Image (cartoon, rainbow, N blue to C red):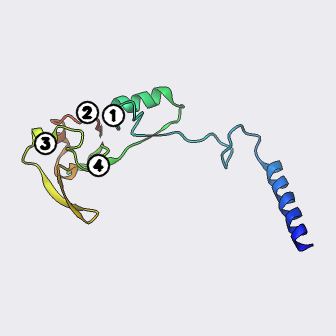
C-alpha cells in the first residue's frame, strides 16, 4: 500500500509540474530563449578566434550572441584573443622575434615558447596573429 501511495504521489507531483511549466516555446529551465555562445567565433569554418570568425558569428547568429575568447594578457596589460598559450601556434612570432622564446612551468611541465606575458602590445602589432583580436 505504501508503494502504491508513493507511485500515486509521484504521478500527481509530475502532473503538477507539467501544469506549472511555461507555455514558452523554449524548453529551457527558465522558459527563456537559450544563450548562443560563439566560442572562438564561427570556428571550424574559419580560424579560431579570428576577426572573420567573430564577424560571421555576429552576422549569422541571434542578436544577443555571446562572443567568447581565450584572453591572453600582454606584459603591458592588454588582452588579445588567442586560443593557445604559445604564440608560436598560429602566429609569426617566432620569425619576427627568433630569440624571444622563454620557458615557463605550465601545469607542472616546463614549456618552451613565445608567450604574451613577455611581449607588449606594440611588439605584437609587428606579428601576424592570423587569429588574434586585440582588446584595447
Question: Is 81 or 1 nearer to us in this picture?
Answer: 1
- Give the mark nearer the N terminus: 3 vs 2: 3
- Give the mark nearer the N terminus: 1 vs 4: 1
Q: Residue at x 89, y 73 (%)?
A: 2
What whole-number distance in Å separates the C-alpha atoms at marks 4 and 2?
15 Å
- Give the mark nearer the N terminus: 4 vs 2: 4
Would you say 75 lies left or right of 18 here?
Answer: left
- Give the mark nearer the N terminus: 1 vs 2: 1
Q: Which residue is mark 4?
A: 72
Of all residues shown, which one is farthest toward the bottom?
2
Displayed quadrant of residue 104: bottom left
Check contact, mark 1 vs mark 2: CB within 8 A.
yes
Q: What secondary structure is marked by label 2?
A: loop
Whole-percent x, y for residue 100 in the image: 10, 49
Q: Residues within 10 Å of mark 1 (few under 14, many from 20)?
A: some
Q: Which residue is mark 3?
A: 94
Q: Residue at x 84, y 54 (%)?
A: 16
Amino acid at each position: 500500500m505504501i508503494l502504491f501511495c508513493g507511485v500515486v504521489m509521484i504521478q500527481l507531483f509530475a502532473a503538477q509540474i507539467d501544469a506549472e511549466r511555461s507555455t514558452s516555446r523554449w524548453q529551457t529551465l527558465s522558459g527563456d530563449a537559450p544563450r548562443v555562445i560563439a566560442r572562438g567565433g564561427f570556428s571550424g569554418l574559419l580560424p579560431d578566434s579570428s576577426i572573420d570568425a567573430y564577424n560571421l558569428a555576429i552576422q549569422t547568429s541571434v542578436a544577443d550572441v555571446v562572443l567568447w575568447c581565450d584572453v591572453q594578457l600582454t606584459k603591458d596589460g592588454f588582452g588579445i584573443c588567442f586560443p593557445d598559450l604559445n604564440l608560436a601556434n598560429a602566429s609569426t612570432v617566432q620569425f619576427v622575434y627568433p630569440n624571444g622564446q622563454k620557458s615557463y612551468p605550465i601545469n607542472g611541465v616546463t614549456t618552451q615558447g613565445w608567450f604574451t606575458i613577455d611581449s607588449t602590445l606594440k611588439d605584437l602589432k609587428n606579428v601576424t596573429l592570423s587569429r588574434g583580436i586585440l582588446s584595447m
